[in-house]
Image (cartoon, rainbow, N blue to C red):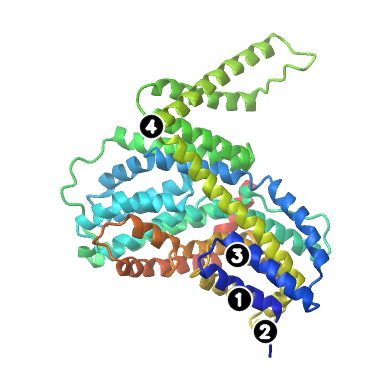
């Protein structure tokens, strides 16, 4: 019995990706090859490929996806400007004197960096270079130290703003609309990035709490594995803590608060984050910081003024007060622009501007190339009848909707051993999520479960990206085996986190329902 072309196509894609070639080339090449085979076998209609132009145009004009390069830029700026490094050092001194304190500081810093950068690689490398050597020198079990650093770095996937959540919002919104059309509804609802961020916030914080409880329990029952910091030195003063913590927190509040409060769209909020990160980097540089801080305050006042008293000088009934407000807003914007230019000049003087722009373009190009070529793959896969076959498989699962969901979550978990979260999100999820939503699963709740599952893919050997990042940054005395063994308890904690969201759906659905 020969394997159907659609299943053979999916298996060939996984084999091609494991060969090490760039994913986007493998997606497009596999799709083209099986489109040709399907056409020759009479199983694929080549006229379907005429829809590719419309699909590409839809991706390139998608307002949701525009936020991705801006959030990436924000994270890269915070990494290159050493703001993350200062935060790590301060938190280590603050929590170090208690048992398990260094591990707790790594988790807390991971959560703060997740909410201000959302870039897993930057966080894992920073903590691998700073926190991990300190933990090992202080007598921490190398496996516990490695696992903690790896896992804390992955919080950038579940705590907003996150590239994963933005992609998931787009994928789940399309799946939700597709499910509603299948139900005969033509006045459809959508899922916004703001709703996705709100849904993931509490589960992300719940994971942070689970990690900290585990570290406290481990330090209590096996004190030698997580001792208190010896020779802790002076604990940081309140001023030092404020200096390290307040800037990232202000940035987090500005970005997430504007989205959740309905003040700004995700793209606008991402712009605020990008500019804010640039100003933070410039202010940290030393001389000239007062001008940059003044510019940041001025831009904040402009935002407040625009909300309280919008200036519209083109109206015919404009009065003296309107012109005065217009002049004030112009002055504030001018101060802000000067501060931004000063920050750019400082970044260039410190030789970090080029790496920032290069990293941003590299990551953005990788994500969009994968999204575009995945649309080619999914079109051919559907043309070969793959979506109908998946629907048959899911509906035939024992246990009904719950059984189908268990199967999909297990499939995503296994694929996470071999594939990147972008690949799973763009290739697999559009095929399975419409069926799950039709079965009655709440799309936001489902998206959060999938997000935690995809976060776990960063930890699962052999291709977990956090493992690679830490291996590159870890001291030589830390072995690869210790890193792999160290993440196993955290993988189990991730599964426990999914269980919490599964058994208590309100953890994911309460905040979006209240805010939106």
Question: What x and y, as percent, mark residue 183?
Answer: 80, 66
- Please name whichever residue, 104 or 202, is drawn nearer the observer in this view of the structure: 104
Nearer mark to the viewer, of 2 and 3: 3
Check disc 1 and report its element: helix, strand or loop. helix
Which numbered tag is attached to residue 468?
none
Gap in angstroms between the C-alphas marked 1 and 2 = 10 Å
Is residue 373 shown above or below 161? below
Which numbered tag is attached to residue 26?
3
Gap in angstroms between the C-alphas marked 2 and 4 = 58 Å
- Asked if marks 1 and 2 touch (Cβ < 8 Å), the reply is yes
Is the residue marked by circle 1 packed among few (<14), some (14-19), or many (20+) residues within 10 Å? few
- Please name whichever residue, 130 or 471, is drawn nearer the observer in this view of the structure: 471
Is the residue marked by circle 2 packed among few (<14), some (14-19), or many (20+) residues within 10 Å? few
Looking at the image, is mark 3 or mark 4 earlier in the sequence? 3
Which numbered tag is attached to residue 3?
2
> At 23% from the left edge and 41% from the top edge, which residue is drawn?
235
Question: What x and y, as percent, mark residue 338?
Answer: 51, 20
Looking at the image, is mark 2 or mark 4 earlier in the sequence? 2
- Please name whichever residue, 231 or 78, is drawn nearer the observer in this view of the structure: 78
Nearer mark to the viewer, of 1 and 3: 3
Looking at the image, is mark 1 or mark 2 earlier in the sequence? 2
Check disc 3 and report its element: helix, strand or loop. helix
Dot 4 corresponds to which residue?
350
């Amino acid at each position: 019995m020969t394997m159907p072309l659609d299943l053979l196509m999916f298996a060939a894609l996984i084999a091609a990706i494991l060969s090490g070639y760039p994913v986007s080339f493998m997606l497009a090449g596999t799709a083209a090859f099986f489109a040709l085979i399907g056409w020759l076998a009479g199983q694929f209609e080549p006229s379907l490929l005429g829809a590719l132009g419309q699909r590409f145009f839809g991706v390139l004009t998608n307002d949701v996806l525009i936020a991705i390069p801006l959030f990436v830029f924000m994270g890269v700026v915070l990494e290159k400007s050493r703001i993350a490094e200062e935060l790590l050092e301060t938190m280590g001194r603050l929590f170090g004197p208690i048992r398990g304190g260094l591990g707790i500081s790594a988790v807390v810093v991971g959560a703060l960096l997740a909410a201000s950068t959302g870039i897993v690689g930057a966080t894992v490398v920073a903590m691998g270079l700073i926190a991990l050597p300190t933990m090992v020198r202080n007598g921490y079990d190398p496996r516990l130290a490695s696992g903690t650093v790896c896992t804390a770095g992955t919080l950038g996937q579940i705590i907003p703003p996150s590239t994963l959540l933005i992609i998931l919002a787009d994928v789940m919104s399309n799946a939700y609309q597709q499910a509603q059309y299948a139900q005969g509804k033509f006045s459809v609802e959508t899922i916004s990035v703001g709703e996705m961020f709100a849904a993931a916030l509490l589960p992300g914080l719940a994971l942070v709490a689970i990690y900290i409880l585990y570290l406290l329990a481990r330090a209590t029952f096996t004190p030698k594995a997580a001792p208190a910091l010896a020779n802790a030195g002076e604990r940081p003063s309140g001023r030092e803590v404020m200096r390290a913590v307040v800037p990232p927190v202000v940035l987090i509040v500005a970005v997430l608060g504007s989205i959740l409060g309905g003040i700004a769209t995700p793209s606008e909020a991402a712009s605020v984050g990008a500019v804010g990160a640039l100003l933070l980097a410039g202010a940290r540089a030393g001389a000239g910081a007062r001008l940059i801080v003044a510019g940041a305050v001025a831009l904040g006042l402009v935002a407040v003024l625009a909300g309280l008293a919008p200036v519209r000088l083109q109206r015919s009934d404009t009065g003296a007060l309107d012109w005065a407000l217009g002049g004030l807003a112009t002055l504030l914007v001018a101060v802000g622009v000067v501060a931004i230019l000063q920050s750019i000049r400082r970044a260039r003087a410190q030789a970090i501007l080029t790496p920032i722009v290069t990293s941003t373009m590299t990551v953005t190009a990788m994500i969009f190339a994968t999204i575009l070529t995945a649309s080619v793959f999914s079109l051919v896969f559907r043309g070969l009848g793959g979506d109908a076959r998946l629907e048959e498989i899911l509906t035939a699962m024992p246990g009904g909707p719950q059984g189908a969901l268990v199967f999909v979550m297990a499939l995503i978990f296994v694929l996470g051993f071999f594939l990147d979260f972008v690949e799973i999100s763009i290739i697999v999820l559009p095929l399975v999520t419409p069926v799950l939503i039709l079965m009655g699963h709440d799309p936001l709740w489902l998206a959060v479960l999938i997000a935690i599952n995809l976060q776990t893919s960063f930890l699962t050997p052999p291709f977990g990206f956090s493992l690679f990042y830490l291996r590159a940054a870890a001291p030589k005395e830390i072995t690869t085996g210790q890193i792999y063994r160290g993440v196993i308890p955290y993988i189990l904690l991730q599964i426990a986190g999914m269980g919490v969201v599964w058994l208590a759906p309100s953890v994911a659905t309460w905040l979006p329902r209240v805010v939106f």
